[in-house]
Structure formats: C-alpha cells, structure tokens
Image (cartoon, rainbow, N blue to C red):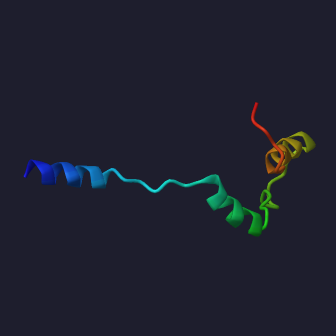
C-alpha cells in the first residue's frame, strides 16, 4: 500500500508546462488589441501603453 500511495502522490503533482513557442504562434495570428475607444488618454499615457505593444520591448 505504501508503494501505491507514493505513485498516486507523484502523478497528482504533474503539471503541463507552457513553452513560449506554444503561445507565440497563437498570439501572432491574433489581431493586436488597443485600449477601448471610450478611454480618454493623454499623449503621454498612450505612449506608455504603446511601449508594451511593441514586439521588440525588452525588460531591463
């Protein structure tokens, strides 16, 4: 019974790993979403949001 319990415990901790290549294909085919038209943003706020929409954005 001890062996069976350890096997069940091990199987319950298995998780699916998401790789960046799994989500890249999906995100490239989907249209980019902006902010809702009802939002009134200043030029500075819009520029800040646009920084994160750029594909070459790198975290520092």
Residue at the top extreme, as displayed? 60
Q: Residue 6 placed where, x, y %?
A: 19, 48
Q: Residue at x 55, y 55 (%)?
A: 18
Q: Nearer the viewer, residue 29 or 49?
A: 29
| Residue 24 appears left or right of 56 | left
Quarter of the image for the C terminus: give it: top right
Count the labels in the image: 0
Q: Is residue 2 left or right of residue 43?
A: left
Residue at the spot 79% in from the left edge and 62% down from the top edge = 32
For residue 8, which quarter of the picture?
Answer: bottom left
How far from the left and from the top, in percent, is residue 50?
85, 48
Residue at 84% in and 41% down: 48
Q: Quadrant of residue 57?
A: top right
Residue at image coords 86%, 46%? 46
Judged left or right of residue 49, residue 7 is: left
In percent of width and height, residue 9 lies at 23, 50
């Amino acid at each position: 019974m001890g062996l069976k319990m350890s096997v069940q415990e091990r199987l319950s901790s298995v998780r699916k790993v998401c790789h960046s290549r799994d989500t890249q294909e999906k995100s490239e085919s989907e249209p980019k979403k902006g902010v809702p038209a009802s939002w009134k943003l200043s030029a500075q706020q819009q520029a800040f949001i646009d920084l994160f929409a750029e594909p070459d954005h790198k975290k520092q």
